Image (tube, rainbow, N blue to C red):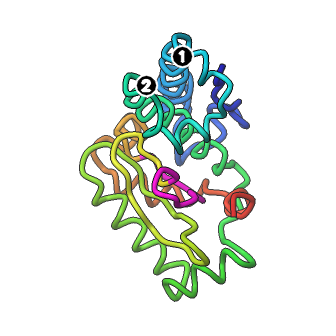
Amino acid sequence: MINKMKLPYAYDALEPHIDAQTVEIHYEKHHQTYADNLNKALESHPDHKDKSLEELVKGYKELPSELQTVVRNNGGGVYNHDIYWAIMSPDARKEPEGKLKEAIEKKWGSLDEFKAEFKKKALGQFGSGWAWLVKDGDGVDIVSTPNQDNPITDGKEPLLGIDVWEHAYYLKYQNKRADYVDSWWEVLDWAKVEERM
């Protein structure tokens, strides 16, 4: 059985950047539904029930055809949200250090330049999806994915990701996705991102 991660803080811990109602609905309803749908589908495929969430998402194209879409959408939904919640914190360290900082500066020149490019990718994702900082070979890159797709299926390790589905921000920011992205940096914990590196 695949379980979503335990939320590591209270619903209101990310205020004022992400409001308590959004966190509660997003975590308890959206994230939970992805886990429920995935587990329901896996019940009829016992030979795949013992695989890890990462194995399922990474290799969904090799699964039986009737499982592929469910794992892509719902397995991806659980996996993506597990990353999303884990890299945020009410006591976030606001800047990267060490190898991650060096990789970002080598690719974009500065953290501010990276943030500008990342924001462009997040705003440019048409409809629902995600923007990601990924480990790509020896370096890093920015990619976006539609729906609940994850860069891991393309061989890229996700280091951080922002959910740009409207359910992630609409209660507080309405249609102002840019304001949500700008505010999100205040709760992104670079220490958690470095652990993923």
On screen, 139 above or below 34?
below
Q: Position of residue 22 (x, y in %)?
A: 48, 32
Q: Quadrant of the N terminus?
A: top right
For image coordinates 57% across by 45% down, the residue present is 84
Q: Quadrant of the C terminus?
A: bottom right
Label 1, secondary structure: give it: loop
Instruction: Of the two numbered discs 1 and 2 on the same chain, state the one appearing first in sequence.
Output: 1
On screen, 195 above or below 88?
below
Residue hosting label 1: 45
Q: Nearer the viewer, residue 93 or 144?
A: 144
Q: Are marks 1 and 2 in contact (CB under 8 Å)?
A: yes
Q: Amino acid at mark 2?
A: Leu
Q: Nearer the viewer, residue 22 or 105?
A: 105
On screen, 117 above or below 47?
below
Q: Residue furthest left?
A: 126
Residue segment shown in magenta: 152-163
Is 134 placed left or right of 164 in the picture? Answer: right
Sort mark 1 into few (<14), some (14-19) or many (20+) by Cα contacts within 10 Å.
some
Task: Identify the mark at residue 67; answer none if there is no mark.
Answer: 2
Q: Position of residue 34 (x, y in %)?
A: 49, 25
Q: How many angstroms separate mark 1 from mark 2 (CA)?
A: 8 Å
Sort mark 2 into few (<14), some (14-19) or many (20+) by Cα contacts within 10 Å.
some
Q: Amino acid at mark 1?
A: His
Is residue 133 within the magenta segment?
no
Q: Position of residue 67 (x, y in %)?
A: 43, 25
For image coordinates 61% across by 34% down, the residue present is 53
